[in-house]
Image (tube, helix red, strand yellow):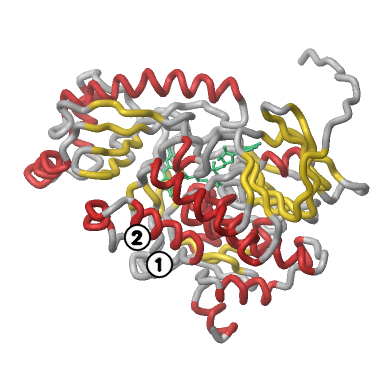
Amino acid sequence: MKTITIPADQIPVSREVEVLVAGGGPAGIAAAIAAARNGASVLIVEQRGYLGGMGTAALVPAFCPYTDHEKPVVRGIGLELLETMKQACGPDYMSRYGEQLDWVPIDAEVLKRVYEAKVLDSGADVLYHTIVSQVVMGAGGSRVDGVVIVNKSGRSYIGCRYVIDATGDADIAAMSGAAFQKGGKQGELQPGTLCYVLSDVSYSRFNEYLERTGDTGQIPALVQKAQAAGDLPHGRKEVSGFSWISDSLVGVNFGHIFGIDGTRAEDLTRGAIEGRQGIKVQLDFLRKYVPGFEQAHLVTSGEQIGIRETRRIVGDYTLVKEDFMSMKSFPDDIARNSYFIDVHLADSQSQMDIQHLPSGRSHGVPYRALLPAGVDNLWVAGRAASSDRVVQGSLRVMPNCFAMGQAAGTAAYLASTSSMTSREVPIRELQNLLVRQKAWLGEEVHAALNI
Ligand SMILES: Cc1cc2nc3c(=O)[nH]c(=O)nc-3n(C[C@H](O)[C@H](O)[C@H](O)COP(=O)(O)OP(=O)(O)OC[C@H]3O[C@@H](n4cnc5c(N)ncnc54)[C@H](O)[C@@H]3O)c2cc1C
C-alpha cells in the first residue's frame, strides 16, 4: 500500500480521567456505570451521538435471553437497564412484556434515553461524535498512557490510568499491539444484517396466520416459498426475528450480507448500500406474502449494518467450545453465560451452527478472558472478549456484554483504589463487590462468598 509520512504534531491534552471507556455499547455502558457508581472518574468516548451500540445504531431489535429458562443468569446493571427500559416504554408495552426476560423487544429511542440517564446518573461523563484513533503506550509498552481522539474540534489527547475497550472490535487492544484473532481459519466472518423498523403492520393478523397454519414466528414456510419463486435470495431459510414493539410496530432482523469485515470502512459502506437494497426486496416480500404486513411502511433502518463478529482478543484465558459444552466454572468467574451457540452462516451455502445448553445450566466467564495478553491496564469487554469463534457466537449477545462490562468497570475501580494492574485485582474482592452489586456468578461463587 502507498504511504505518506505526516510531520510530528503537537496536540492539546483535552482531559485526564481515571477510567476511559472506549465505545458506548452494552459493554461500555455497564462498565462506565459500574466504575463510576463505585467512585472512579469515568469518561465514555463514543463515535455516535448516542449510546447503545448495535442495539440502537444497528437497530438490533431485541435483547437475547437474560435467563437459562429457569432463572435470570444476567442480573446486576444489565437487568436494571432492561427493567428501566420496559417501564419507560409505557403501560401498553408493560402489559405485553412486563414479566418477560427473554427476547424483550427494543424501542431504540426509549433505550437511548434510558442508557444516557443511567450513565449520567452514575457520575460518568460522555463524549459523543468522537472516535478513539490511536493509543499512546507508556515506557515498556505494557500500559496505555492515553488515547488520541478525533472529532469536530480536531485531534486531542486524553490521559488515563485505565482503559476499558468496549469498541466491540477490540480497536484499543489492536492499536496497543495486543494479539487478536479474526474470523475462522479461512478468515470467514459471520454475516452482517441491516435491521429495520416497520409501522402499519398488524400483530393480531400475523398471529392469527401463525395459529391457523402452524408456521413459526420466523415464518420458514413463507420464506422458502418466496425463495423458490425467486422473490427472495437464497441463504437463511427463515427470518432471524420479528420483535413486536406494539401491535402495529415491529423491529425486523432478516437476511444476511456476506463478506463484511466490520473493521474496514469500505466493507461497512458496501454493507450499508447492499443492506438498503435488500430491505426493499424484503419489504416487497413481506407485503406480498405475510398476513399483517400488507400495508407495512419502512420507518427507519440502522445507521450502520449490524456486525456480529470481528476481532477476538487473545486473553490470559480463551474460552473454548469444550468449556461451553461442559458448562465449566472457573475460580475467577465474573459472569455466567447460558445463551446458545449461534454462529450465523458465513456464505449463502453454509449452515448455521446452533447448540443449546440444557435448561437451568450455564458456564462461567473467567476474569482472565477480559485481559489482553501483554497489556496491564486494559480490559476488553463485550463481543471481542477472549474466546474461540464458536463461543463468541454465544458470548456476543447484549446481556452477556452488560455482565462483562460490569465486571470490567468494577475491576477498573478496584485497580484504581491502589494503583494495581488489571492482573493484580484480587479476584475474591472483585467477585464480592460484583455480587453485592447484584451480579450473578453462579451458586458455587455465591456459596463461597456466603452472600
Ligand atoms: C444483526 C444482529 C442481530 C443481533 N441480535 C441480537 C439479539 O437479538 N439480542 C442480543 O442481545 N444481541 C444480538 N446481537 C449481538 C449484539 O447486538 C452485539 O454483539 C452487542 O451489541 C455487542 O456489544 P458491545 O458492547 O461489545 O459492542 P457494540 O454494541 O458494537 O458497541 C460498541 C460501541 O463502540 C463504539 N465504537 C467502536 N469503535 C469506536 C472507536 N474507535 N471510538 C469510539 N467509539 C467506538 C460503537 O459506535 C458502538 O457504540 C445481534 C447482533 C447483530 C449484528
Res 148 → quadrant: top right
- Please, what is the three-letter code of the amino acid marked with disc 2? Leu
Q: Which residue is found at the position 35% from the left and 67% from the top? A: 359
Question: In the image, is 283 to the left or to the right of 430?
Answer: left
Q: Which mark is residue 137?
A: none
The part of the image, by quadrant, that contains residue 210 is: top left
Instruction: Decide: is 41 above or below 210.
Output: below
Q: Seen from this angle, which residue lies furthest left?
A: 212
Q: Where is residue 371 in the image (x, y as percent from the top left)?
A: 71, 56
Mark 1 sits on what residue? 72
Distance CA(mark 1)–CA(mark 2): 8 Å
Residue labelled with disc 2: 101
Side of 49 where 425 appears, left or right: right
**In the image, the residue with mark 1 has its CB under 8 Å from the nearest atom of ligand 1:** no
Residue at figure coordinates x 40%, y 38% from the top left: 351
Disc 1 + disc 2, Cβ < 8 Å? yes
Q: Is mark 2 on a helix, strand or loop?
A: loop
Element carrying mark 1: loop
